[in-house]
Image (cartoon, rainbow, N blue to C red):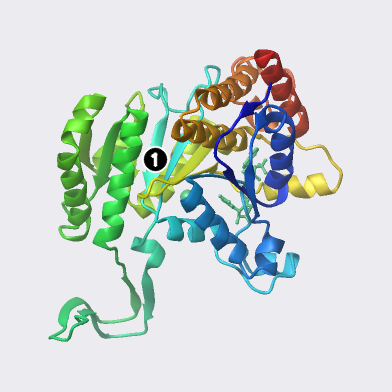
Amino acid sequence: MKISVKTALVELDGDEMTRVIWALIKDRLILPHLDIKLEYYDLGVKERDRTDDAVTVAAAKAIARLGVGVKCATITPDAERVGEYSLKKAWPSPNGTLRGILDGTVFRKPITVRNIEPAVNAWRKPITIGRHAYGDLYKAVDFAVPGPGLAELVYTPAGGGAPTRLAVHEYSGPGVLMGMHNTDASIMSFAKACFAYALSERIDLWFAAKDTISKTYHARFKDVFAAEAAARASELRDAGISYRYLLIDDAVAQVIKHPGGFLWACTNYDGDVFSDMLASGFGSLGMMTSVLVSPGGAFEYEAAHGTVRRHYYEHLKGNPTSTNPIASIFAWSGALRKRGELDATPGVVRFADGLERAVIGLVEDGIVTKDLVALVEPSPAGYETTEGFIDKAAARLAAARA
Ligand code: NAP
Ligand code: MG
């Protein structure tokens, strides 16, 4: 009997090896078991090019409307990709567009299994990173200073009035200069998304910055988080979780000795850096999940890795691949669980749990793709192809549901 999913799920297809994996997951793990309406958007780079990227905007609006989306990894084109796929131009990152429209925060959580020991001995439970995905270094204006001169920050009030000028540096020779910004609205929606995620997962929340040095900029982040913690004090107490602020260097030192099981909220650059540290510390990029949470309550699930380009070129040559599909499978299970929660359909939630159990069970039995061979203890004798792994997961899932 197929399980009926009440509300349509927004599906965002993608590129290269992950597109190949995507079709296999849908065909072998999802559609045989679920009666589901998928609102499909093809975010493959050729379709983005054909529609002048309108398809990405339409997909983002569909996620905002329906509440839950699941996304395949996509190419962010650079000059080389423009040539490779004969594109009209280097379209912006689809994830950037989705984040912009949904005003969301990205949470990355590693999938942990019993037989993969994290690189850091202390880590027992997943550490989730919440990365503020707006502003700072990523929207900075920078400038190569040609020679001696005064650099200033100038703010001109929109309604008229005297500009504020602050001296940045008196250059005696060439150098570099950068202007960074953030907004209260974005910091607030980041803080709200972090508290909402921590409460929904019932895990402690840490936020870390450098307010001792950055007494206005980083201090604003700290104050906004403190205000949100105060506003939600009773919810935090009821959930049995806590909020703490740390200096970023203290946080880094403590993370290495902590058993895990908490959400680490990071400013944009810290999140970029530490999410990669955690991904490799917990195992493989193929085991890192990602979810974009909007303050309006929309969720978009995906794998944290890209389109695994090198493997795709092997696939195109007709060679077998051994690409880890687990993070992509968990994008589907995460989206389906959330859909089931929002629709109050426990059968869909149970299906998502069962799908994850089937996959984790395989890995814990030593049935893995190549990337996990060196990580799994005891070391398996061999490894599965991409399709072979998905087929074994499908058989295990079907057996568990029979
Ligand atoms: P990638 O897809 O993250 O893969 C980089 C390398 O990491 C792979 O070559 C592979 O290493 C390993 N790897 C990643 N995922 C794996 C998996 N599931 N199983 C096994 N190994 C895995 O990055 P990329 O190949 O450099 O980038 C390709 C495209 O992805 C780019 O066009 C980029 O724009 C895009 N991208 C998209 C997203 C997204 O949509 N969220 C995120 C990042 C990048 P080995 O080659 O050593 O086996
Ligand atoms: Mg990074």
Of the 4 image quadrants, the one containing the N terminus is top right
| Nearest to the observer: residue 211 or residue 173 | 211
**Apparent side of residue 245 relative to residue 256 in the rendered image (left or right):** left
Amino acid bearing label 1? Ile
> Quick one: label 1, few (<14), some, or many (20+) residues within 10 Å?
many
Is residue 131 depicted above or below 26 in this figure? below
| Residue at mark 1 | 129
Residue 95 seen: no
| Nearest to the observer: residue 311 or residue 88 | 88
Residue 108 lies, in percent from the top left, at: 45, 40
For the residue labelled by badge 1, is the local secondary structure a helix, a strand or a loop? Answer: strand
**Apparent side of residue 280 relative to residue 24 in the rendered image (left or right):** left
- The residue shown at (70%, 33%) is 31
Residue 380 lies, in percent from the top left, at: 68, 18
| Nearest to the observer: residue 374 or residue 299 | 299
Residue 236 lies, in percent from the top left, at: 22, 31
Residue 371 seen: yes
**Apparent side of residue 189 relative to residue 133 in the rendered image (left or right):** left
Disc 1 beta carbon < 8 A from ligand 2? Answer: no
Of the 4 image quadrants, the one containing the C terminus is top right
